[in-house]
Image (cartoon, grey):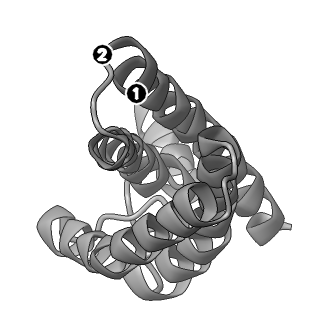
Amino acid sequence: MKEFWRAVKFTLFSVSAGLIEIAAFALLNETLHWPYWVSYILALVLSVLWNFTLNRRYTFRSAANVPIAMLKVAAFYAVFTPLTGWLEHLYTAGLGWNEYVATILNMLLNFVTEYFYQRFFVYGRSIDTNSRTPEAEAEAAGDRR
């Protein structure tokens, strides 16, 4: 049951990151008329930072070294971003798909692969080690009584 709720939290935080990504993309692409790839990358970076911060603290409750965890996430995106950039170009320029449909497809691919990557590689050994774990919160509450 614990893993189910972990997946639910990851999903909700990913939805919020997706909304940030779409909003940032729309602002940069539609309003400022920046090049598509620049809009995509900047929107992706904003959503990754948001998602990393929330999931580290609340979903995986990890006390892992932040710079190391961030480097692991950066490594994921060093592979994921060029791949999805190529897919975005293929979908939009090659196949003539709508830019938003292409972005949403890549966001779904990101959602699935990133959950497993973070769950097993980034936080695998440090899950539930921060002060937000139920055990730590119960102990802190007991100390206050």
Say the numbered circle drawn on residue 29: 1
Q: Along the horizontal axis of the image, is 97 left or right of 87?
A: right
The answer to whether mark 1 and mark 2 are in CB contact below 8 A is yes
- Give the percent coordinates (x, y) of residue 136: 47, 54
Residue 4, visible in the rendered structure: yes
- Give the percent coordinates (x, y) of residue 62: 39, 64
Q: Along the horizontal axis of the image, is 114 left or right of 144?
A: right
- Give the percent coordinates (x, y) of residue 145: 49, 29
Q: Mark 2 points at which residue?
A: 32
Q: Along the horizontal axis of the image, is 59 left or right of 37?
A: right
**Foreground residue, 106 or 72?**
106
**Foreground residue, 97 or 114?**
97
Mark 1 vs mark 2, CA separation in Å:
6 Å
Residue drawn at x 38%, y 53% is: 52
Q: Is residue 48 above or below residue 21?
A: below
- Give the percent coordinates (x, y) of residue 57: 42, 49
**Foreground residue, 23 or 88?**
88
Q: What residue type is labelled 1?
A: Asn
Residue drawn at x 69%, y 51% is: 97
State how many labels appear: 2
How many residues crowd mark 1 within 10 Å: few (<14), some (14–19), many (20+)? Answer: some
Mark 2 element type? loop
Mark 1 element type? helix
Direction left: furthest residue: 67
Q: Which amino acid does label 2 sit on?
A: Leu
Q: Quadrant of residue 112?
A: bottom right
How many residues crowd mark 2 within 10 Å: few (<14), some (14–19), many (20+)? Answer: few
Q: In which quarter of the image is residue 115?
A: bottom right
